Image: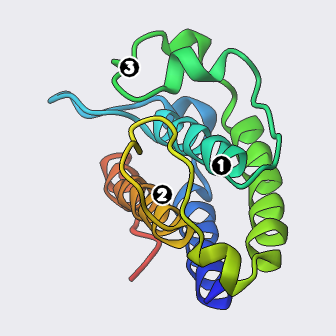
Amino acid sequence: MNDNLLWLYMINDNVLKVNSEGVTHDESLIHSEHGGNCINWVIGHVLISRMHLLKFLDVEWKLPEIIVPLYNRGTSGDGYDQFMQLEKLKELWGESQKLLTETIGALTPEQLGETAPTFGDFTKPDTRERRILFLHFHESYHLGQLGLMRRLLGKQGAIQ
C-alpha cells in the first residue's frame, strides 16, 4: 500500500508546484475580498500538517518557529507582513516531500496496519494507514484551493 501512498503524495507535490509556478511572493499574499486565505497561507498551513505527519511517523522535522502562529488552523491570515517568503515556503515543501517519500516508502504493511497513537484531534483508535490517508485528504483539500487562488490572481489554471 505504501506505493499508493507515495503516489498520492507525489501528486500533491506536483499540484503545489504547478499551481505556485509563476506566482510572486506579493501575489501569494493576495486573497479574496470576500474572505478566505491566500496561497502563502495555504502552503504554510499544509507545511504544519506535514510536520505533524512526520512527527506521527517518528521523524523530527522542525519548521521555523514563526510558521505555527501565523499559519496554524484557525488563524485569520492576518499578519501578511510577517509571512515567510514564498520561495522559502517552497524550499521547505521540498524538504518535507523528500522526508515523506523516504519515510512512507520504508513503512511495512504491518506498520501501516498498526493501531496509531493518539495525537491532536485524533483521539479515537485507528490504523496508521488511515491517519496518513486522512492527513493526505486534508492536504489535498487545501492544495485544491490553490487552483482557485491562482485564477483570482488572473493567471491561467495550471491543471486543465
Place of residue 101 in the rendered image (x, y in percent of width and height, measured from the top left): 78, 71
Q: Quadrant of residue 76?
A: top left
Q: Dot 3, how many residues are within 10 Å of its Cα: few (below 14), some (14-19), or many (20+)? A: some
Q: State left or right for residue 88 relative to residue 109.
A: right
Q: Which residue is mark 2?
A: 135
Q: Amino acid at mark 1?
A: Phe
Q: Which residue is mark 1?
A: 56
Q: Is label 1 in contact with label 2 (beta carbons under 8 Å)?
A: yes
Residue at the image position 39 percent from the left and 42 percent from the top: 123
Residue type at numbered disc 2: Leu
* Residue situated in front as seen by the camera: 35 or 69: 69
Residue 83, position in %: x, y?
59, 20
Tell me if mark 1 has few (under 14), some (14-19) or many (20+) residues whose alpha carbon lies within 10 angstroms of its own.
some
Placement of 122 over or under 150, stated as above or below: above
Q: Position of residue 113 (x, y in %)?
A: 57, 77
Q: Is tag 3's residue or tag 2's residue first in the polypeptide sequence?
A: 3
N-terminal of the pair, mark 3 or mark 1, is 1
Q: Quadrant of the C terminus?
A: bottom left
Q: Position of residue 75 (x, y in %)?
A: 38, 19
State the CA–CA distance, disc 3 to disc 1: 23 Å
Q: Which residue is mark 3?
A: 75
Q: Residue at x 62, y 34 (%)?
A: 25
Element type where label 2 sits in the image: helix
On screen, 84 above or below 148? above
Mark 3 falls on what kind of element?
loop
For the residue marked with disc 3, what is the amino acid? Answer: Thr
